[in-house]
Each structure stands twice: as C-alpha cells, then as structure tokens.
Image (cartoon, rainbow, N blue to C red):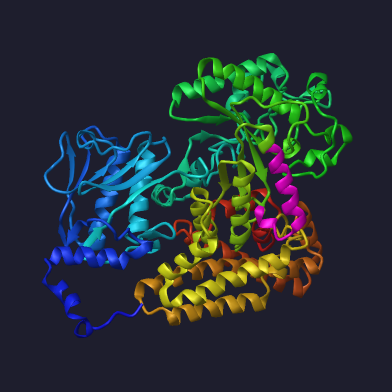
C-alpha cells in the first residue's frame, strides 16, 4: 500500500492532526495493524503511548506461578515493543484506568467481564469496557492467550529457540481495537516428545532429556526449547511415558522373586539379566493375572503422585522377545506381520514369532484401564500401536479410557503414494477401534541423525488428514535441529492448533517476518532440499543412516545440490539489509555445514571399504585392516577417513547447546547403528 504525503491530504483528513496525540496514535496503530492484526472497529484501548504505560496488567492475588509468568512475559514483550514498563498488579480489586487482565481474578469477576463456559484448553482474547482480557480455561491456556495476543495482534514471532529466533516489532505507541475471540485447539495433545525409555542403558537415565544432560546439553538449553514450544502453543494434555516395562516391572524388584512375570521365549522365562537396558527386551506375560494387577497398581500409584496428568503409558518394551505361552498366543488373531515394522527383528526368524499380537496386547491394556477406572475415573491408559501390534485389533474392542498411539512411520515417506495409502488405512482402523486415538510421528529417529529432511507439505497434509480421520492427540519424536529441520516443527505447531490454516501462508509469514529481503533466497534453499528429498523417496525407499554400507546420503546430498544450497545462503547474506536478519541467515549456515561434513565423512569411509577394509562390525574391521595395512593407499585412505569423521565430531561438539543440530540423535545414532566408524578408525590409526 502507498500512502499519500501529508500535504496531499484533503482538509478533512488534515483535521486528524488536531486530535489528541494518544488517540491519533491509537487510531493509526489500529489501521496499520489491519486485518492481520487487531480489529480496527470499536473504541481503541491504548496500551502504551510514546513509550509510556497507559494501562496496568492485573493478575489475581492468588495467581499461580504459570499465570504470573505469563503476565511477566507480556510485560517483557510490551517493553521491548514500546519501551514502556507496564506495571503488574496482583489485586483484590481493579486499579483505576484500563487493565489487561491475565488469568482469572476477583477484579475480573467483580466487573462481570469473565466469559462463561470456557473449556479447559480454550482461551479468550476480548476487549470490554475499556479493558483487555487474556483468559484461559486453565493456566496453560491463559499462557496461550498471552502468546497468541502478542503474535496475532502485535506481530511477535518465535521462529526458533533463543533471542535470535524472536521477531519483535518496534513501536513506541501500542493500541488495539475491538477484539472478541475464543480459540480452542484441534489437537488436544501437541507434544514434541519423545517420552519414556529411549536411550537403552544398564546404568544412567533412559529418558531423552535426562540423557541429554548426561551427554553435556545444558539445562538452560532445554529450558529455552521448552519455552519456545510453549510460545508456539505446543502442550495440551499431560501424558507420561513411552516404552514402560522398565518402570513397571524393574528386574531388581521382580526378576528373582517372580520370574513367571516375564515372557516365555523358546521354552524359558526371558528374565532380564545384568545387561538389561530398561528399553529393549524384558517383555512380560500379559495374560498372567498377577502381571495385570502389578500394572494396575503401578498406574494407580502414578496418578496418586501425579494427579495433574491425564494419561500414562503401559507400552511394551522396544524390540523382540514377546511371550509364547499358550494363554498369550490363544488371544492372537492368527494374522502374520506383513512387514517387519519398527525394530521388530524377531519377525525375521520363525513363523511362530511372526504373528500379529495386537489383540493380546490390548486385552492387557483394557484390563489395566478397567482396574484404574475404579479408583481414578477419567484417567487414560495409553499404549503405542507399534511393532507386531501396530495394526488395529481384530477381536477386541478397546476400553473407552484406552488410548492407542499409532506409530506412524512416517509422513516423511509420503512422497510415495503407496506408503501414504498404507499409513492412512492403518490410522483409519485405529480411529474406528478407539474412542480416542493418538499419533506418534517420527520427525527424527535413530537411523537419521538430524540431517536435512524438509517435508512440510507431507507433514501438513498428514496432520490435516489425521484430524479428519478422528485423531486429536499427536506426539513427535523430535530433536533440537532448528537450523536444519526447524521449519517442520514450526509449521506443525501451527497446524496442530488450527488445521484450517494454510501451510503456505504460514511459510510466507515465516520467511517474510524472519528474513525480510533475504526471504526469497531462504525459501529457495528450503525448497531445493525439499525437492531433493521428494525425488529420493518417491519410489518408497527410506533414505536412512542405518548403516554406513547401505546409506544413500551421497546420492541424496549430491555435490551439485550442496553447492546450490551454499549459493542460496550466500545470496541470502548479500540480500539481508538488517544485521539481525543477517545473523538469522548465518544461523542456518552451520546446519548445512553439518550435512556437508557428514556426507564427506561417509564418502571417505566408503573409499576405505572399497579397498577391502570393512568398517563394521568392529572385529571384522580390525582384522581387515591388519591384512591390508601394508598397502600405501590404505594408510592414506585411513588418514583421510579419520580426519573427516574427526572434523564432524569436533563440529558437532561445538554445537550441542546452539539449537543447530539434534545432538541427542547424533549420539544415539553413534551407539545404536553401524554408521559412524570413528572408534574403529581411531583404533586402526594407533
């Protein structure tokens, strides 16, 4: 829009100049914000005028820490926008003048402005009687009201964690027009996850965030990521856990006293031994009545200790070793697993271990839920639909308070119509089988250590389809690779709250607000990587880092693709006419460098394998090297491979706290897959 010069305005328009300054500022701000900001009709509420506070933020005198923090966030951002220090008052009665009511309070009730019938996860943003109301059905929803007000009406954005990812407009005067809206999320659980036992370990934590801290990621880094999630309205219901048997049936409590609790495999009870990692194996006999009672009591104890939680997992452990006793097998449908699925390595062995076991697993989960309802009505018992129990049950109806969480592996494969169709069919079956169903979606996994995998169109279409199918719970397996795949998380958060949004408009806003004149180059950079992923996976192939020998990374990230990506970022730096925008462009650079270093390391290692030095398994690698080490070319290739992988390692270590790489998943890949040969290379070079 082009605005006429003041001297070109008609006399009636020039009369605006005779208005009081604060009212003129309010009217102009309302107009400038336009339909993408506040409504311009109705009386304006002036929040700040020429850097001075014109209202008071009010919280209840008994407001929770969550609500007080939301009020402080509002205060902080209003100061950054306008320079005005808006006072916060915890009041038993309303102060004089305009107020911003954050959360419920006696003054709000006294003024009879509180909306009636607000759902727990809903919030309202409303101007009334010269005041602004930011109120949620619960404290978390009140936080979402504050963040939505800042985003929708004042133009603030949180593109990724940390101050660099924040977009905060500047205006010394801030005003809003008439607002009256209520929002409620489409997905009631929007969790970036993951939960439960993830890092298998005989000692130390298995949960992701606790293991991250052990690996050296700071608590401050984790807190900033959690705050970014809250500001982008990730959250909702509280559901604990994932693979849960290590918690429910710890071997130190039951292995000796009750070996019969554990699965019968090959005619023997598979009692966990000293190498048990609390994630894999350790399966239980789900038809043993005592096992059911132990699980019921554990869930009851959990809810006693965590009454704020809505649900808890009783999911079987990862991997193999399910019970083969007659009672368990009698509940099976007799179907065979069509695909080995996720970590279902046992299905590759014998037909007896290749059966679908969904009915037996959810018979167990039903029994646990039935027992829990007697003491904790309304609480949910959750189980992943995974491995040999990934398909819906044939003969069992799910208890109303059982939530199956379908492990959709994954929309990143939906360039293949066949994969998309299969996933949608399985999802539809679970939605029909359960009163309430959830999704576990793999934005990252052990075979993908956080390299570029930009799949916004597929994730967006999947989220919308899942909502239409009947799902309202969604958890991801994610990382902190915001300089690499952060756009996936950003768009998903918006759509999980409101599936009616157009992901293209979300992207337009992201690029425009975050990168200004550099936006076209950054968009091209992302689209280039997105097209490359689509081309590499359209035939159904899963491009992965499961093993060094099988990975297709060099075929995906070709030298030409990486050169073009680097050129896009250089162009973006040249186009950036603002120091902050330039820093945002620079933030993306290390993400591309990580992918470049990984591909270079893979290629260097493959050259060593090409001359007969197999790098996995370790014993074989050392034997091959002993036989070939006298060759001059082998020594040179070893030195080159060692240097490439060490460069990658040093680079990753520098970034563990910088929101660039998914540090946890880089390390997870190293210890669980045959992809990173650095330990062998170091040993060979001694």
Image quadrant occupied by the C terminus = bottom right
Residue at 30% x, 47% y is 126
Q: Is residue 665 visible?
A: yes
Residue at 42% x, 68% y is 514
Q: Looking at the image, how many numbered discs can be counted on the residues? A: 0
Residue 239 at x, y percent in the picture: 52, 34
Judge whether residue 634 is colored magenta. no
Up/down of 48 relative to 390, above or below: below
Left or right of 303: which side holds 292? right
Residue 386 at x, y percent in the picture: 70, 39
Quarter of the view holding residue 662 = bottom right
Magenta stretch in the rendered image: 411-430
Q: Nearer the viewer, residue 380 or 656?
A: 380
Judge whether residue 412 is colored magenta. yes
Q: Overall secondary structure of the magenta stretch?
A: helix
Residue 451 at x, y percent in the picture: 60, 62
Image quadrant occupied by the N terminus = bottom left
Residue 113 at x, y percent in the picture: 25, 39
Up/down of 79 relative to 254, above or below: below
Q: Nearer the viewer, residue 7 or 346?
A: 7
Up/down of 57 relative to 12, above or below: above
Q: Nearer the viewer, residue 418 or 219?
A: 418
Quarter of the view holding residue 626 = bottom right
Residue at 82% x, 22% y is 330
Up/down of 561 relative to 239, above or below: below
């Amino acid at each position: 829009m082009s605005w006429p010069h003041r001297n070109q305005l008609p006399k009636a328009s020039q009369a605006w100049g005779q208005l009081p300054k604060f009212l003129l500022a309010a009217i102009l701000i309302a107009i400038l914000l336009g339909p993408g900001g506040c409504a311009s009709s109705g009386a304006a509420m002036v929040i700040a005028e020429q850097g001075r506070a014109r209202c008071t933020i009010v919280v209840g005198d008994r407001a929770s820490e969550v609500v007080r923090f939301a009020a402080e966030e509002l205060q902080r951002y209003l100061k950054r926008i306008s320079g005005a220090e808006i006072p916060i008052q915890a009041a038993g009665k309303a102060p004089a003048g305009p107020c911003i009511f954050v959360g419920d309070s006696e003054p709000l009730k006294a003024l009879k402005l509180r909306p009636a019938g607000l759902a727990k996860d809903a919030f309202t943003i409303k101007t009334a009687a010269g005041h602004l109301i930011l109120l949620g059905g619960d404290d978390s929803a009140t936080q979402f009201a504050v963040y939505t007000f800042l985003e929708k009406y004042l133009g603030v954005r949180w593109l990724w964690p940390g101050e660099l990812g924040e977009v905060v407009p500047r205006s010394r005067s801030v005003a809003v027009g008439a607002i009256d809206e209520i929002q409620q999320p489409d997905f009631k659980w929007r969790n970036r996850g993951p939960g439960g036992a993830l890092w298998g370990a005989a000692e130390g934590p298995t949960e992701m965030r606790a293991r991250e801290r052990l690996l050296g990621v700071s608590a401050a880094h984790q807190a900033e990521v959690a705050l970014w999630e809250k500001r982008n309205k990730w959250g909702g219901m509280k559901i604990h856990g994932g693979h849960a048997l290590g918690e429910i049936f710890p071997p130190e409590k039951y292995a000796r006293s009750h070996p019969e609790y554990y699965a019968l495999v090959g005619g023997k009870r598979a009692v966990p031994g000293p190498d048990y990692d609390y994630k894999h194996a350790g399966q239980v006999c789900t038809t043993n009545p005592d096992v059911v009672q132990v699980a019921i009591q554990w869930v009851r104890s959990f809810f006693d200790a965590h009454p704020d939680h809505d649900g808890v997992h009783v999911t079987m452990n990862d991997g193999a070793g399910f019970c083969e006793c007659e009672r368990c097998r009698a509940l099976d449908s007799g179907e065979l697993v069509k695909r080995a699925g996720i970590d279902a390595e046992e299905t590759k062995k014998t037909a007896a271990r290749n059966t679908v076991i969904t009915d037996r697993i959810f018979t167990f989960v039903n029994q646990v839920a039935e027992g829990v309802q007697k003491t904790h009505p309304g609480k949910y018992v959750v189980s992943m639909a995974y491995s040999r129990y990934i398909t819906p049950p044939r003969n069992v109806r799910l208890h109303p308070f059982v939530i199956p969480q379908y492990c959709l592996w994954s929309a990143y494969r939906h360039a293949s119509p066949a994969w998309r169709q299969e996933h949608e069919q399985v999802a539809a079956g679970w939605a029909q089988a359960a009163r309430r169903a959830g999704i576990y979606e793999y934005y990252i996994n052990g075979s993908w250590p956080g390299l570029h995998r930009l799949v916004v169109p597929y994730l967006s279409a999947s989220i919308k389809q899942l909502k239409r199918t009947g799902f309202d719970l969604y958890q991801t397996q994610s990382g902190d690779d915001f300089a690499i795949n952060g756009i996936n998380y950003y768009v998903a958060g918006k759509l999980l709250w409101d599936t009616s949004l157009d992901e293209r408009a979300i992207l337009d806003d992201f690029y425009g607000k975050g990168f200004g004149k550099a936006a076209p180059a950054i968009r091209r950079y992302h689209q280039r990587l997105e097209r490359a992923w689509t081309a590499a996976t359209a035939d159904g192939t899963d491009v992965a880092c499961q093993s060094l020998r099988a990975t297709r990374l060099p075929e995906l990230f070709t030298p030409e693709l990486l050169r073009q990506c680097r050129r896009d970022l250089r162009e973006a730096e040249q186009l950036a006419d603002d120091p902050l925008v330039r820093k945002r462009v620079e933030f993306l650079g290390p993400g591309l460098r990580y992918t470049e270093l990984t591909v270079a390391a893979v290629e260097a290692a493959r050259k060593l394998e090409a001359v007969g030095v197999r790098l996995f398994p370790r014993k074989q690698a050392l034997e091959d090297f002993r036989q070939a080490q006298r060759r001059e070319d082998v020594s040179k290739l070893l030195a080159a491979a060692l240097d490439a992988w060490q460069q990658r390692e040093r680079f990753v270590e520098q970034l563990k706290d910088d929101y660039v790489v998914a540090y946890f998943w880089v390390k997870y890949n190293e210890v669980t897959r045959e992809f990173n040969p650095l330990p062998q290379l170091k040993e060979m070079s001694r």
